[in-house]
Image (cartoon, helix red, strand yellow):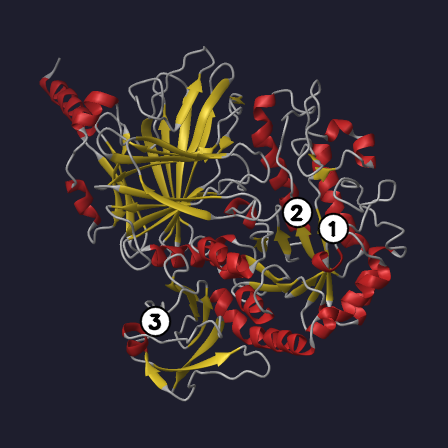
Amino acid sequence: MRSKEIFILSLLVFIAGYSKAQTINIPIETKSNALVLQVNSNKGLNIIHFGEKLGDPKEYAQIPSTYKQAEDYTGVLNSAYTPSGSRNLMEPAISVTHADGNNSLDLKYVSHNIFKIDENVTLTSILLKDPAYNFEVTLHYKTYYKEDVTEQWSVIKHHEKGNVILNKFASANLYVKADSYWLKQFHGDWAREMQPEEAKLTHGIKTLDTKLGTRANIFQPSVFMVSLDKIATEDEGKVLYGSLEWSGNFRIDLELDNQNNLRIIAGINNYASAYTLKPNEEFTTPPFLYTFSDKGKGDASRKLQSWARDYKILDGNGTRLTLLNNWEATYFDFNENKLFELIKDTKKLGVDLFLLDDGWFANKYPRNADNTGLGDWEANKTKLPNGISSLVREAKNNDVKFGIWIEPEMVSPKSELYEKHPEWVIKQPEREEYYYRNQLVLDLSNPEVQDFVYGIVDDLFTENPDLAYIKWDCNAVIYNAHSSYLKNQSHFYIEYVRGLYKVLERIRAKYPTVPIMLCSGGGGRVDYGALQYFTEFWLSDNTDPLERIFMQWEYSYFYPAIVSANHVTDWGKQPIKFRTDVAMMGKLGFDIVVSELEEKELAFCQAAIKLYDGLKSTIWHGDQYRLANPTEGQVASMLYIDESKSNGVIFNYLVGNRYGDNSKLPIRLKGLDANKKYSIKEVNLYPGTSSSIDSEKIYSGEFLMKIGFNPDVNARRTSVVLQLSEVE
């Protein structure tokens, strides 16, 4: 061989060896934070940093390699997407059975792509492949720069000679380093949604999950927080917020490993859901959503709320309709004349819309109770001889809009639909039926059922073009899960949610702007996967205003006020002013008997609605600051302030009444401009009462944030609403 050829060959070998030894850093950055991925010398993709970002991205290369011991003992602990069956001994993000029966998987870096969608949004995609099998995973990281929010998901694909079984298929795999970790999670039940618990994570795996199929969040929502080093407060500390954008079974594993690092693996629950993936078929997981703040829980929640309004919630920066619902006025007992009177009451009250709730449909098995009629979506001829169209016309004649309740995913065993299409119902063929709220669930994995459910909505709008609002309910979980349509029952829980989303996509394609409330026997289906199709959600059937203060407080960490549907009802012992003030901290509605209101009560409600029209933009679109936590004292206080920091509204409530407890007063405000001057005026006063607040006084923003303001909440003034205005 000639010397020149030897030199070139040696150079190529040197370059190849040099390239193999090089690492590649992939910083995924937002305004304040960074997730830094590193391709090591063996082409493994690892997480080397999660948290506050560095000013100079080049310095990520200097992060010391602290994982040698971890690699020696347990495989790659800090893997960006941990496979099972090879070197990893910890909880995997993905586990498969190949076409030849082999259960091992190893994923190596191939390439990555960074695509800037616009000035604020960037999508980073990273391709990983198994060197021994024709199997690949693409990790996607969609970042929202200003909001410090990331959506992460995976796309799984293979080109093997037969089917591959996906035994686990997470959306995301995070790796976090701190001295200690504190998990805030939530639990609940009907009328007890969003009960918080916060505790230190110990070694092992803490799992948050649900297996309910529908109404999946009623016992355990997918939202959570993890504080690093110590429990984050409202304004201090490091905290990660997470949530899965999926309206079905989810699973979130939080594993504190033997190196005292936290691994978070989130995705669809693989319970009873091993997925058979055909060659060339793509399996796309739902996004796992997260944000991080080193300035406390309040800052993290404002980032998430801003992101939700701008990018996820339908018409998040738009407007909403106030309404009067008939449910607590009539329940199932109504007729056309009674509803006509309620429509007139809607006009008298001053809200935008009358909402007709459950009980308007079915003829062979009339919907006069909750055990008949679901699925038979024609107007009941006894109650409504002239159909829904007469109600829509009556509403229009009274200058209000008309909305209607449906529960299209459900069926009553006593219904014509059940008699005609028992094969559309989710049930085990050889087992006794078991009911939740006297009903069963329709099989949305079946395209015929999808067409039927879409048709319910489409027919209502086709027959009633002026229909202005839908309340979409979902009251049952799935028992005896079985689809007569699907050949592979392991796909059922996944295909149900996919079918639901297909229906909602069709509805939104034809009716893109119609307001639709997401209801599920209360807050049983509250997630950002669903909220991209809905304008608001029903938090809970518990409308006791005292309980609602606590629920709305916890929901607000993850969802903005514009999607929080709050109704004034007769629940609770508080006066009408207290109930109305609480409901104003979101999207205001009423579910009361207007004709039974006393003169002063009616006058108050009418004035409150007019006031709300002037405040709602700040409440819906402004920044939210939690001032006094109801779980920590006798007073709850919440501030909403507009982007210019010129106008705000402060809601204050007495939530306890122990003698002489004023330790939280005055209340320090937040989020103001320290150099601006403000006046504070009490609003929403009950007729015949006067305010103890001096509205003539002027305060600097600095004074209000450092010294504070006393709203004078006490046993005689249990609810105080204050309007904050800049003084030029």
Q: Residue at x 84, y 40 (%)?
A: 365
Label 2 packing within 10 angstroms: few (<14), some (14-19), many (20+) = many
Question: Do the residues bearing badges 1 and 3 touch, measured as CB atoms within 8 Å?
Answer: no
Callout 2: SS:
loop
The residue closer to the viewer here, 214 or 607, is 607
Q: Nearer the viewer, mark 2 or mark 1?
A: 1
Report the mark closest to the observer, 3 or 2. Answer: 3
How far across and how far down the image is residue 92, in percent?
36, 26
**Residue holding disc 3:** 665
Q: Name the image quarter holding the C terminus.
A: bottom left
Tell me the amino acid under the disc marked 1.
Asp
Q: Is residue 158 visible?
A: no
Quarter occupied by residue 607:
bottom right
On the image, which quarter does residue 66 sit in? Answer: top left
Label 1 vs 3, first from the N-terminus: 1
Chain-order first, disc 3 or disc 2: 2
